[in-house]
Image (tube, rainbow, N blue to C red):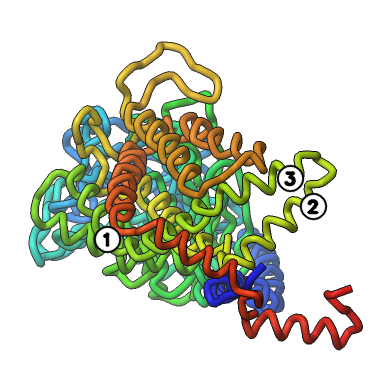
Amino acid sequence: MKMDKNTIFGLVIIAAILIGFSLWNKPSQKELAARKKTEDSLRKIQKQDSLKLVQNKAVKESAAKKTDTTAKSNNKAAVPNPKDTTKAAVAGTNLGLFSKATTGEKAFYTIENELLKIKLASKGGRVYSVELKKFKTYDKRPLILFDGDSTVFNINFYTENKNVSTKDLYFRPFWYGNAKGNHLNVKGTDSISFGMRLYADTSARSDTSKKYIEYLYTLKGNSYMMGMKINFSNMQSVFAANTMSMPLDWMVKPLPQEKDVKTERNASTIYYKFLEDDVDYLSETTDKQKNLETKVKWIGFKQQFFTSVFIADKSFNNAKIETKTDKENPKYVKQMSASIDMPYDNTATCSIPTHFYFGPTQYKTLRQYHLDLERQIPLGWSFFLMQWINRFAVIPVFNFLEGFNINYGIIILILTILLKIVLFPIAFRTYKSSAKMRVLKPEIDEIGQKFPKKEDAMKKQQATMALYKKAGVNPMAGCLPMLLQFPILISLFRFFPASIELRQQSFLWATDLSTYDSIWNFGFNVPFYGDHMSLFTLLMTVSTIIYTKINSDMMGQTNQMPGMKVMMYLMPVVFLGVFNSFAAGLSYYYFLANVITFGQMYVIRRFIDEEAIHRQIQENRKKPDAPKKSGFQQRLEEMAKKRGYNPKK
């Protein structure tokens, strides 16, 4: 086969893609783990020593400590929620300094801005629920990421030979500045701070104690980011002197937000970023757990279009993350949990600064924080061509067209037209190559008749390749254009299902372009197909079959490879089942791409003179000498001769 410039360039492109792909995915986590191995081992030993010191200290101090059963609430820092005076108690109230915190007022406090409404609970002092005010669920209810028992935020520690869990204890509110009341609102450029304190009782009035653990929440106007400082005030005598870390458990069971819970589950998992490494994630489709043995910058519990991210201003020491799925329970998407080891400095004013991001997985929103949070959007990050196409071509064009306030179905149409215009030179080259193959079809058919037997398949193949060589036609010339188009097809395959911009955007009969369109719900499940019929998927499948037929005729293919021909027509049918539950925007795009391709074929065919191509091929065949070999092919033959191989024998 003739090795011309197109073939050589194609081989170079393929090699570059493979090499780039390998370098891009080169793991570095093991190197980090090796460097931190000694440090982690030392930390474990220190934790064990810390526990022993706490136990010894408890024996000496238990006789001197007395629990004061009287608590007063006339100080500003201990105002209960007047709307809920229900009292509750924790089983086993003998927690030493924290015994009084086992009973308290079940109260809630709300802080909100233009984007977030965050409810805080007195029990555990934790974020009880988060509502995204600019979004709704698929059935138009308020969009709440999690609430109530679907979340845990807990610090575990030992004191006085007792294991204390903050999730079981009652915190007291503390207002900063001029803020008052149980519902605080901030707008614009302002910010508010609100504290939840867990006091260690040392006097008759626990709320006057200077020993406490505080969750200090800070919320700015018009932001999805909430600051959270975990403050330890004068706790150095409560914890062992050599305490170097503080274990924290964070668990969330995200509530369903989309129409198709199965698709939402398959797009939900835990993402994480190492301090000195790239972003990674657990499998979306299977339950997984993993030990993150080096410093971690952030951990995100991501759903299909929304995410909750816990961010260290500096870093966490390490973490253990895990996902669990209860496929029979549609109440929750899945369970995501993280056991985090936070660095702790046992001083009078130890503070661990962190942040929470509660918001959409929108590229331009996440990108502004410069924390690689946008890596939670599956844009094909593992393959540089795909992510470049999405980041620097598709997303900018998409965002630009959004500014004109036009329907998203029209935006997809315009985007498809623009992409086809850019790819038109490639399409023209492909068609021209297919025209050469088509004019040679009669000669190829003659070769097939000359070698009709199966045992002569090799002779038929050799005769065919000799014909191509004599005529100056490269049958692989059309492969390079297809290779260049492939990354774009895969990039858009990743972009549309992950694009929150399409969420709840209607077009024609589709009520939501981010999920499947259904024109008929069966009421039962059809194996490999589903319980509904997507019209956009049907249109995509039919147009793909038509395109396959037209392309096959254009290439002048014969029955040399009947198995391959069957496969070409079978693949669109397979896609019918696969795409039936995919985003309607994706099927709509592929349908548009096929329709525009038909138009391109019609236009190109009018400008290509196949008779002139045929005359040129016939002139090439009349030449006595074979077409000149490419330099690359000549070098290959020279190398073979040096090794003792003679191609003429």
Q: Earlier in the sequence, mark 3 or mark 1?
A: 1
When asked about the image quadrant of residue 160, the answer is bottom right
Outermost top residue: 523
Q: Quadrant of the N terminus?
A: bottom right
Q: Which dot, 2 or 1, sits closer to the camera?
A: 2
Choose top left, top right, bottom left or bottom right for residue 355. bottom left
Per the image, label 1 sits on a secondary structure element best described as: helix
The residue labelled by disc 1 is 421
Q: Residue at x 31, y 69 (%)?
A: 392
Residue drawn at 50 percent across, 30 percent down: 573
Q: Foreground residue, 326 or 161?
A: 326
Three-letter code, disc 3: Lys
Q: Which label lies toward us, 3 or 1?
A: 3
Label 1 CA crowd tier, 10 Å (few <14, some 14–19, many 20+)? some
- Residue 490 % position (x, y): 45, 54
Alpha carbon distance from label 3 to label 2: 13 Å
Report x, y in % for residue 29: 62, 71
Residue that numbered label 3 is attached to: 450
Residue 152 horizontal/vertical position (percent): 44, 45
Q: Amino acid at mark 1?
A: Ile
The residue under label 2 is which amino acid type? Answer: Met
Nearest to the observer: residue 645 or residue 403: 645
